[in-house]
């Protein structure tokens, strides 16, 4: 008898419609959603990180959103542990767990049962790399990672200095790229029987237009006020890596008076992030791609996803 937990995964780039699809599938399968978003875990910055609203959740329970203090560093290993517990709890209550998000490293690490070595790699390396980032800049540090380990660089944003340093630490200590180190750390087979669905776009410009519209809507919804309040209430925080925060801080500090340029920068950085997300997910085996700009009406799109799940090997005992 197969003891693996069935798991539906809804992945894809930012602004692709993952939340809407995950909620629809959850209602169809009597499921609950577990977020796989490295920024939505933090308290605050609701608009900047596009956390789903109560209206968007439509009564479907969501987990691992808005629970971590913004000053607290949060590792992939911590996410895998917490997400695993959430999924087990959902399944124990005869509900279908649905993993939804765009942080590929979170999703892959969870599904592939990656074992992380949480021991400290040594203060000297970390301090040296931190000093390098301060003196030469975050981009220079990230470019070092890109040169030795392009796969990890594609998955880690240059502003996530903590994770970039961790990847470089592993390389310096072991001589093994962090991406391969994580693969080697997968000591056991997956705990899940997964059906992975990724939202894509045949025409990349359609996605970029959605991103631009979403940023405009964020601004209308009060993004600037949210970032200003967050900036004055918190010390430099892990959460300040969020796109939409760091681009507006120069305006809030008075370093620039060109708000339109800051907003355009948010759009540009979000489009770049979406491109990196797509690159990551294309490397994941077993993904079922569905193209939001190819199927037409949302109901047709949803029906195609339901058919993929129905034909998959997971035990979708809750599907009506």
Image (cartoon, rainbow, N blue to C red):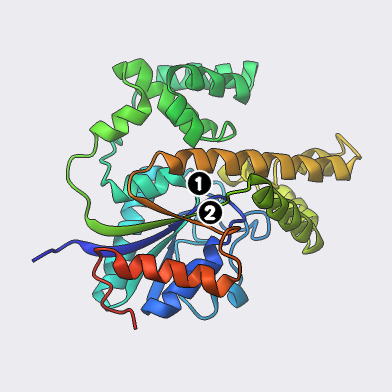
Separation of residues labelled 2 and 1 (CA atoms): 5 Å
Image disc number at residue 69: 2
Q: Is residue 127 above or below residue 63?
A: above
- Please, which residue is most extreme toward the bottom here? 320
Q: In the image, what residue occupies the spot 44% across and 30% down?
A: 152
x%, y% of residue 114? 27, 42
x%, y% of residue 209? 72, 52
x%, y% of residue 83? 35, 58
Let me know if residue 62 appears in the view: no
The answer to whether marks 2 and 1 mark residues whose Cβ atoms lie closer than 8 Å is yes
How many discs mark residues in the rendered view?
2
Q: Nearer the viewer, residue 70 or 209?
A: 209
Q: Is residue 85 above or below residue 126?
A: below
Image disc number at residue 72: 1
Secondary structure at numbered mark 1: loop
Q: Is residue 199 above or below residue 156?
A: below
Q: Nearer the viewer, residue 125 or 179?
A: 179
Q: In the image, what residue occupies the spot 58% across and 51% down?
A: 201
x%, y% of residue 280? 46, 39
């Amino acid at each position: 008898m197969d003891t693996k937990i069935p798991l539906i995964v809804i992945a894809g780039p930012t602004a692709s419609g993952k939340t809407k699809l995950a909620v629809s599938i959850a209602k169809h399968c009597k499921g609950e959603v577990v977020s796989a978003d490295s920024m939505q875990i933090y308290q605050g910055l609701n608009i900047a990180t596009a956390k789903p609203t109560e209206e968007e959740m439509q009564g479907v329970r969501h987990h691992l959103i808005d629970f971590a203090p913004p000053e607290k560093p949060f590792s992939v290993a911590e996410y895998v542990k917490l997400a695993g517990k959430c999924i087990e709890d959902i399944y124990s209550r005869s509900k279908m767990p649905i993993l939804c998000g765009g942080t590929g490293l979170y999703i892959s690490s969870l599904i592939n049962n990656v074992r992380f070595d949480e021991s400290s790699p040594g203060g000297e390396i970390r301090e040296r790399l931190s000093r390098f980032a301060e003196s030469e800049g975050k981009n220079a540090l990230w470019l070092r990672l890109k040169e030795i380990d392009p796969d990890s660089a594609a998955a880690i944003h240059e502003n996530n200095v903590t994770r970039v340093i961790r990847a470089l630490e592993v390389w310096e200590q072991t001589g093994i790229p962090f991406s391969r180190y994580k693969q080697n750390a997968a000591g056991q087979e997956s705990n899940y029987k997964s059906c992975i669905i990724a939202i894509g776009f045949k025409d990349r410009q359609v996605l970029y237009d959605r991103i631009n519209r979403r940023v405009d809507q964020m601004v209308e919804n009060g993004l600037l006020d949210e970032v200003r309040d967050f900036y004055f209430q918190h010390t430099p925080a892990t959460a300040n890596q969020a796109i939409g925060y760091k681009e507006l801080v120069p305006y809030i500090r008075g370093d620039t008076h060109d708000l339109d340029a800051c907003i355009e920068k948010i759009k540009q950085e979000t489009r770049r992030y979406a491109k990196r997300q797509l690159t990551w997910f294309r490397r994941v085996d077993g993904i079922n791609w569905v193209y939001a700009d190819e199927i037409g009406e949302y109901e047709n799109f949803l029906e195609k996803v339901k058919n993929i799940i129905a034909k998959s090997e997971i035990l979708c005992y809750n599907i009506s």
